[in-house]
Image (spheres, rainbow, N blue to C red):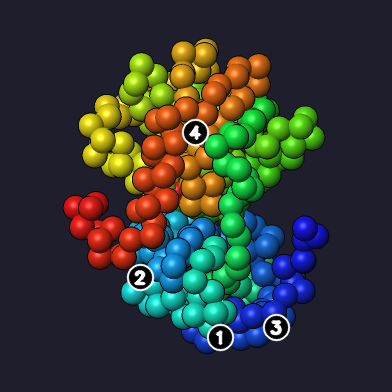
Amino acid sequence: MALVPFDDRDGMIWWNGALRPWRDAKLHVLSHGLHYGSAVFEGERAYGGNIFKLREHSERLKNSAKLLGYEVPYTVAEIDEACKTTLQANGLTDAYIRPIAWRGSEQLAVSAKLTTINLAVAVWAWPNLFGNDRMKGVRLGHAAWKRPHPETAPTASKAAGLYMIGTMSKHQAEDQGFDDALMLDWRGHVSEATGANIFFVMDGELHTPTPDCFLDGITRRTVMSIARRHQMKVVERTIMPEEMANASEVFLAGTAAEVTPVRQIGDLHFSPGPITERLLRDYEALVMMSPEKVASLAA
Ligand code: PMP
C-alpha cells in the first residue's frame, strides 16, 4: 500500500481548542519545537470507539511537559475531551491518536520563556505497527545508540527529542533487514526497542528491565497486571544482554506495537510461544472492554 503523505490527507485536527481542516493544520517553520526539540507527545489507540487508558495518556502528556519545564495549558480532562472530539470528528472508532504539545514561534532561541504552548490532536487509522500475522514474530537488530543516563536527558518524558536516537537506531536496523532495534542503556543493560518495551519469558516467569532510564509504558504496566492475574511471577530487574539466550519467549509491548512476539534478536532465535499468545489475546480482549470495566480490573 502506497504511503499517503501526512500533509495530503483529509479530516479534522484539533488545534489549541478548536477543530481545523487537516490540510490547514500547519505551523510556522520558526517554531521552537522544531528547532530545539521542545515537543512532547502521546500515542494512543481507540478500539470500538473507546480510547484505551486515555486518562493515563493525558496525565503522562502533562507530566512529560512538566519534565521539560512547561505546562500544557489544558487540564487532563480537557485533553481527554480533545482526543475524544477528534476521534469522533474523523468518524473513526479504531484508530491511533496523536496529541502533541510544543513551544511556539514567539521566540526562537535556547531560552524560550516567551513562547506560548500549543496543543494539537490528530487521529488516523493504523492497524498494527508491525503489520498482520502477528504471531510470526518480528526480528530485532542491535542498536548502536544507547538509552541515556537520566541525568543527561529527561528520560521519563515522552519528549520528541529522545526519538532522535530511536529513529537512527530503527533506520540502521531496517538497513540490515531487521524490523526494529533492541537498545541497551548507558550501562549496557537491556532497555527496550525504539518504540515499545520488551519482555522475556524465563523459566515460566515474566522478566522485564527496570524502567529507570526509559519509558515505563502504559502497555507494559497493563501486560504486567494481566500476567499477575494469571498467577505468573513478574520480575522487574536489570537484564544483561548475555541473559537473553535463556529466554524461551520474547515479546514487545506498546500502544502502537500492542503485544508483538519477537523471533530474533541479532544472532539469537526465539519461537513465539503460548505465554506470549495468551498475553496477546488477553490484551486484545481487554482493549475492547468499556473504560469502566478496564478501570475496575486495574483497581
Ligand atoms: N518506549 C518507547 C520509546 C515508546 O515510544 C513507547 C510508545 N509510547 C513505549 C516504550 C511504550 O509505551 P506505551 O505502552 O505507553 O505506549
Please tell me which of labels 1 and 4 falls first in the chain: 1
- Name the residue tied to disc 2: 76
- Residue at 20% across / 57% down in the picture? 296
Q: Are marks 1 and 3 in contact (CB under 8 Å)?
A: no
Q: Tell which of 7 and 203 is nearer to you.
A: 203
Whether residue 80 is visible = yes
Identified by mark 3, the residue type is: Asp
Distance from label 4 to label 2 (Cα)? 31 Å
Please tell me which of labels 4 and 2 falls first in the chain: 2
* Local crowd size for mark 3, using a 10 Å CA cut-off: few (<14), some (14–19), many (≥20): few
* Local crowd size for mark 2, using a 10 Å CA cut-off: few (<14), some (14–19), many (≥20): some
Position in image of residue 283 (x %, y %):
39, 47
Q: Are marks 4 and 2 in contact (CB under 8 Å)?
A: no
- Name the residue tied to disc 3: 24
Left or right, 30 with respect to 251, comes to: right
Identified by mark 4, the residue type is: Phe
Q: Tell which of 124 and 58 is nearer to you.
A: 124
Q: Indicate the quadrant where residue 215 lies.
A: top left
Please tell me which of labels 1 and 3 falls first in the chain: 1
Distance from label 1 to label 4 (Cα)? 38 Å
